[in-house]
Image (cartoon, rainbow, N blue to C red):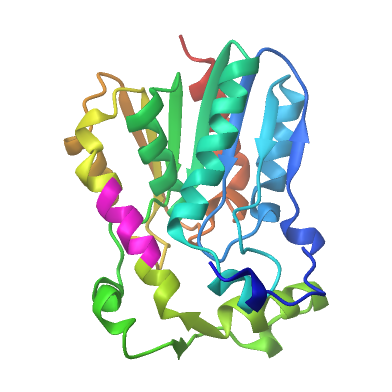
């Protein structure tokens, strides 16, 4: 990381700022995804708060600010961020659960292999990615800095989302994708160390992650308790999609289940 390359006027946009709520002695760590933002989890965050949980929703380094800040962050930084937050929660609360989306699902699996949390939820985990070109990024990153994304500014009504889109979605940072693929490799390598009860949620409507992520995870982990849900309509960010109420209901039920 070269801190000198991060603009001096860098700010974190409201859609990506971290949240924390002090509730009971059961805590939930929520982990957003690659080029994602904490607001993806605001609905689930509020639902968990209403159930009495302590909830932590950190911002992964480099996210929801600008492209230069993102480029100077690394997969190590993202993992260190959630490791620090998990260890802090584990120090203060009786029980800690984790729920992660996409790359956040990879980070959740890595945390589970390291710390054996009480339960985990992985949503649209970036274990089985539909676009196979991403697996070439560890090589391509030496020749290509970025590629054009599918995001279109005219599709956004919100100015803040347009700002985020120009920074993160209009073009894809190839080096950062390679960082995510390295996290995927680590998560896969350590799947057998995951003993925590695991709920996997995927969607047939997800154009980024394929539903067979369920089989990869359930065949790889060592947990004696594993369940999955296959949604039909939800997009990749299923935690904030058209079936978000069902997603939140099932996650809360999972955490409450004996």
> In screen coordinates, is 79 left or right of 59?
left
The image shows residue 112, relative to residue 141, as above or below, that is above
> In which quadrant will I find the C terminus?
top left
Query: Residue farthest to the left?
Result: 219
Residue 238 percent across, percent down from the top left: 53, 53
Residue 249 percent across, percent down from the top left: 59, 32
> In screen coordinates, is 196 left or right of 251?
left
> In screen coordinates, is 11 left or right of 61?
right
Residue 104 within the magenta-colored segment of the rendering: no
Residue 221 percent across, percent down from the top left: 23, 32
Q: Nearer the viewer, residue 34 or 209?
A: 34
Residue 184 within the magenta-colored segment of the rendering: yes
Residue 224 percent across, percent down from the top left: 25, 18
> In screen coordinates, is 162 left or right of 26?
right
The image shows residue 251, relative to residue 69, as above or below, that is above
Q: Nearer the viewer, residue 75 or 119?
A: 75
Which residue is depicted at the point 59% across and 10% down? 94
Instruction: State how many labels appear.
Output: 0
Magenta span: helix, strand or loop, mainly? helix
Q: Nearer the viewer, residue 36 or 180?
A: 180
Give, as a single range, the part of the protein colored magenta.
179-186
Residue 215 in view of the camera: no
Residue 223 in view of the camera: yes
Which residue is depicted at the point 38% across and 22% down? 116
Q: Nearer the viewer, residue 87 or 242?
A: 87
The image shows residue 238, relative to residue 11, as above or below, that is above
Which residue is depicted at the point 48% across and 14% down? 257
């Amino acid at each position: 990381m070269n801190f000198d390359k991060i603009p001096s006027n860098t700010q974190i946009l409201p859609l990506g700022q971290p949240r924390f709520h002090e509730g009971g002695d059961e805590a939930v760590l929520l982990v957003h995804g690659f080029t994602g933002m904490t607001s993806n989890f605001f609905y689930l965050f509020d639902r968990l708060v209403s159930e009495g949980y302590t909830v932590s929703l950190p911002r992964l380094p480099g996210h929801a600010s600008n492209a230069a800040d993102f480029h100077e962050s690394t997969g190590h930084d993202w993992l260190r961020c959630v490791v620090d937050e998990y260890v802090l929660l584990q120090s203060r609360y009786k029980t800690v659960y984790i729920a992660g989306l996409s790359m956040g699902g990879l980070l959740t699996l890595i945390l589970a292999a390291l710390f054996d949390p009480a339960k985990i939820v992985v949503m649209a985990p970036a274990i089985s990615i539909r676009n196979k070109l991403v697996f070439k990024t560890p090589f391509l990153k030496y020749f290509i800095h970025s590629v054009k994304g599918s995001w279109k500014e005219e599709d956004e009504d919100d100015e803040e989302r347009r700002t985020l889109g120009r920074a993160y979605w209009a073009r894809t940072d190839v080096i950062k994708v390679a960082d995510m693929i390295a996290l995927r490799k680590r998560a896969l390598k350590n799947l057998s160390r995951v003993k925590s009860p695991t709920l996997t949620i995927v969607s047939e409507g997800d154009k980024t992650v394929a539903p067979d992520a369920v089989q990869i995870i359930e065949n790889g982990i060592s947990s004696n308790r594993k369940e999955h849900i296959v949604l039909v309509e939800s997009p990749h960010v299923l935690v904030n999609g058209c079936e978000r109420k069902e997603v939140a209901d099932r996650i809360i039920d999972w955490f409450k289940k004996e």
